[in-house]
Image (tube, rainbow, N blue to C red):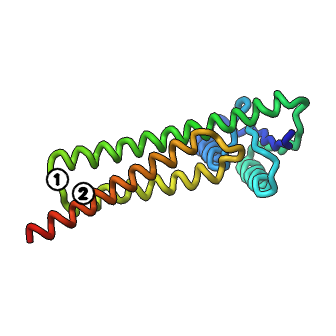
Amino acid sequence: MADWLGLSYKISSEDSRHRVAVWRKMKELGAVYIHDGFGILPAKEPLKHAFENLREQIRQIGGEASILNFTLDGAKDDEAYQALLNAARDEEYGEIAEQCERILYELDRETEKGKFTFAEIEENEPDIQKVKKWMDRVLSRDYFGAIGKNKAEEMIQAAEKRFAEYIHEVYLRNRLET
């Protein structure tokens, strides 16, 4: 069974800016909310430090925060918490795969139109880089090996391959026309 960390916090409902900032940090860490104001993560030292920092930030803005270290009573409960974290990662991996599908669609559409320009390369290259950085962030918070990882990786590879083919075609066509 795994050891877990919980961050329980309460922030004034009048200041949505601080609540959103805490929510973003929790999401960045990969935490899953069990209920309002209570998120969990596996008990790993870097995550404990991150929760400690977040607790202090919450207290500095006038909120209340506590960190709990706990072990669940039973393997099924432990598996359920791991499944919650994996489901959150799988959702993110699914979004990455969908973004790759959009990139592939865009490249295919431009190919069908015969639009092989350097401007299209410049338009699509940041999207490829963005999805790769996004994947790195999700991988950093995939603590239990969510199954959606493989599909997202395949889609990134497909988008990169298709983009490389498109770039090659742009260079071929522009070299022939000049």
Between 25 and 111, the residue placed more toward the observer is 111
Mark before the other along the chain sequence, 2 or 1: 1
Residue 162 appears left or right of 25: left
Image quadrant containing the N terminus: top right
Between 131 and 41, the residue placed more toward the observer is 131
Q: Amino acid at mark 1?
A: Lys
Q: Is residue 120 above or below residue 104?
A: below
| Residue at horizontal 88 percent and vertical 40 percent from the top | 70
Image quadrant containing the C terminus: bottom left
Q: Which residue is tagged 2? A: 120
Residue 82 has which mark? none
| Residue at horizontal 62 percent and vertical 37 percent from the top | 88
Q: Amino acid at mark 2?
A: Glu
Instruction: Say if mark 2 contacts mark 1, CB within 8 Å.
Output: yes
Residue 149 appears left or right of 157: right
Q: Residues within 10 Å of mark 1 (few under 14, many from 20)?
A: few
Residue 90, horizontal then vertical, whole percent: 58, 38
| Residue at horizontal 81 percent and vertical 56 percent from the top | 45
Q: Is residue 119 above or below residue 43?
A: below
Between 149 and 121, the residue placed more toward the observer is 149
Q: Residues within 10 Å of mark 2 (few under 14, many from 20)?
A: some
